[in-house]
Image (cartoon, grey):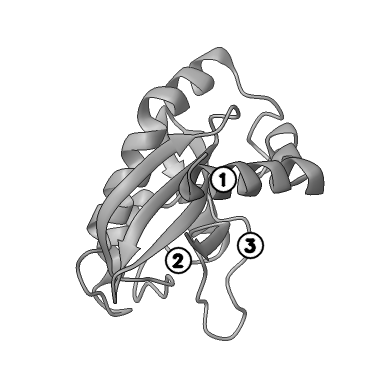
C-alpha cells in the first residue's frame, strides 16, 4: 500500500473510531433529515466529488476576505444563513492549491477526501463533509465560525500527505 492510500485509510479509520462519521446519523440543521434518503445518497455520489474537486481547483486563485465571495456558492446556504455569512466579506480559511492527485468519497457519500498540492509544493489531504440542500450538493463546515473574526474552515481536516 502506498503512502497516500495508507494515509487515507488512517484518516477514514480514525473517523470511524472517534465516531466522527456518525454525524450523518444526526441532523446538521433542524430541517435536515437524520438519515440520507436514496435521492440524497445518489446526489452525493454523483455530485460530491465534483463539488469537492471544483472547490479545491477554485482555491488556485489568491483570495482575500473581500473577493472570496466566489467561494460562497460551495458552502451550504443553511450554514451561511445560520452564521450571518450570506453577504459582505467572506472570511473562509483558504490555501492556494495546485494539482489534484486524488478525489474520493468514503463509504458514507457525505465525506470526501481530496489530495492536492498546496503552495510550496506540499501535498495535503482535505477532508470535507458534504450535504444536499434543495437537490444541490454543498460543503458543510462542521464547526461554527470564530465569534470575533467570523473565520471558518470549510474542511473537517487538513493534513500533510
Instruction: Please say if the residues under marks 2 and 1 sit with CB atoms less than 8 Å apart.
Output: no
Q: Residues within 10 Å of mark 2 (few under 14, many from 20)?
A: many
Q: Are marks 2 and 3 in contact (CB under 8 Å)?
A: no
Q: Residues within 10 Å of mark 3 (few under 14, many from 20)?
A: few
The reply, left or right, for residue 101 in relation to residue 83 is: left
**Discs 2/3, front:** 3
Residue picked out by circle 2: 85
* Disc 1 to disc 3, C-alpha distance: 27 Å
| Helix, strand or loop under label 2 | loop
Q: In which image quadrant can residue 58 be found?
A: bottom left
CA separation in Å, label 2 and label 1: 37 Å
| Mark 1 lies on residue | 6
Point 60% across, 41% down: residue: 9
Mark 1: few/some/many CA within 10 Å (<14, 14-19, 20+): few
Q: How far from the left and from the top, in percent, is residue 127?
A: 52, 51
Q: Residue 50: where, in percent of width, then height?
A: 31, 36
In three-dimensional space, the C-alpha distance between marks 2 and 3, rounded to whole angstroms, equals 14 Å
On residue 143, which mark appears? 3
Amino acid at each position: 500500500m502506498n503512502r497516500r492510500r495508507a494515509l487515507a485509510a488512517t484518516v477514514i479509520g480514525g473517523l470511524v473510531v472517534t465516531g466522527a462519521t456518525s454525524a450523518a446519523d444526526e441532523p446538521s440543521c433542524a430541517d435536515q433529515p437524520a438519515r440520507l434518503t436514496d435521492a440524497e445518497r445518489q446526489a452525493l455520489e454523483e455530485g460530491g466529488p465534483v463539488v469537492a474537486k471544483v472547490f479545491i481547483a477554485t482555491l488556485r486563485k489568491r483570495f482575500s476576505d473581500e473577493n472570496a465571495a466566489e467561494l460562497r456558492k460551495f458552502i451550504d446556504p443553511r450554514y451561511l444563513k445560520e452564521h450571518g455569512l450570506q453577504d459582505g466579506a467572506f472570511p473562509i480559511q483558504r490555501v492556494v492549491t495546485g494539482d489534484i492527485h486524488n478525489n474520493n468519497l468514503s463509504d458514507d457519500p457525505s465525506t470526501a477526501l481530496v489530495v492536492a498540492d498546496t503552495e510550496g509544493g506540499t501535498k495535503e489531504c482535505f477532508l470535507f463533509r458534504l450535504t444536499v440542500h434543495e437537490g444541490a450538493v454543498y460543503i458543510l463546515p462542521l464547526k461554527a465560525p470564530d465569534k470575533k473574526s467570523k473565520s471558518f474552515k470549510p474542511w473537517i481536516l487538513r493534513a500533510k500527505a
